[in-house]
């Protein structure tokens, strides 16, 4: 079975919508320690630590229906929860992003 991080790696180069569908971002790169996303609205890269995904997984929040509010409530990804949520959902849905 693939790990969550392996699934995140597979999303590199894709564009994903946020959960609200009002914004999109590029999964620009993934290395051993972080994923770098680039929101289409700002074009400014935002690094997100692998640890945030691992904490979500450890708490049972790495699912296809996780929400940004659940992640923030668990103390995960205060500032990037919309991106982390969209990446987790795409990783587990195994949907081919646009």
Image (cartoon, rainbow, N blue to C red):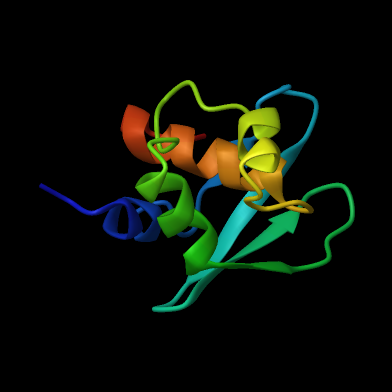
Q: Residue at 46% of width from left, 78% of height from top?
A: 33
Q: Tell me which corner region of the image, top left, top right, bottom left or bottom right, holds residue 96.
A: top left
| In this picture, residue 34 sits left or right of residue 37 | left
Q: Residue at 67% of width from left, 53% of height from top?
A: 77
Q: Position of residue 79 (x, y in %)?
A: 79, 53
Q: Residue at 43% of width from left, 77% of height from top?
A: 31
Q: Tell me which corner region of the image, top left, top right, bottom left or bottom right, holds residue 93.
A: top left
Q: Quick check: can you spot residue 90? A: yes
Q: Quick check: can you spot residue 18? A: no
Residue furthest toward the bottom? Answer: 32
Q: Tell me which corner region of the image, top left, top right, bottom left or bottom right, holds residue 42.
A: bottom right
Q: Residue at 62% of width from left, 51% of height from top?
A: 76
Q: Is residue 52 above or below residue 86?
A: below
| In this picture, residue 43 sits left or right of residue 26 | right
Residue furthest toward the left? Answer: 1
Q: Position of residue 94 (x, y in %)?
A: 31, 33
Q: Is residue 56 above or below residue 18?
A: below
Residue in the foreground of this view, choosing between 69 and 46: 69
Q: Position of residue 92 (x, y in %)?
A: 34, 34
Q: Is residue 70 above or below residue 56?
A: above
| In this picture, residue 66 sits left or right of residue 45 | left
| In this picture, residue 1 sits left or right of residue 73 | left
Residue in the foreground of this view, choosing between 57 and 4: 57
Q: Position of residue 78 (x, y in %)?
A: 75, 51
């Amino acid at each position: 079975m693939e790990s969550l991080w392996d699934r995140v790696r597979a999303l590199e180069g894709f564009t994903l919508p946020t959960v609200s569908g009002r914004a999109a971002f590029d999964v620009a790169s993934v290395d051993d320690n972080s994923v770098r996303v680039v929101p289409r609205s700002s074009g400014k890269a935002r690094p997100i630590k692998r640890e945030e995904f691992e904490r979500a997984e450890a708490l049972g929040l790495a699912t296809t229906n996780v929400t940004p509010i659940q992640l923030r409530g668990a103390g995960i990804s205060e500032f990037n929860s919309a991106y982390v949520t969209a990446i987790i959902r795409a990783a587990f849905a195994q949907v081919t992003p646009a």
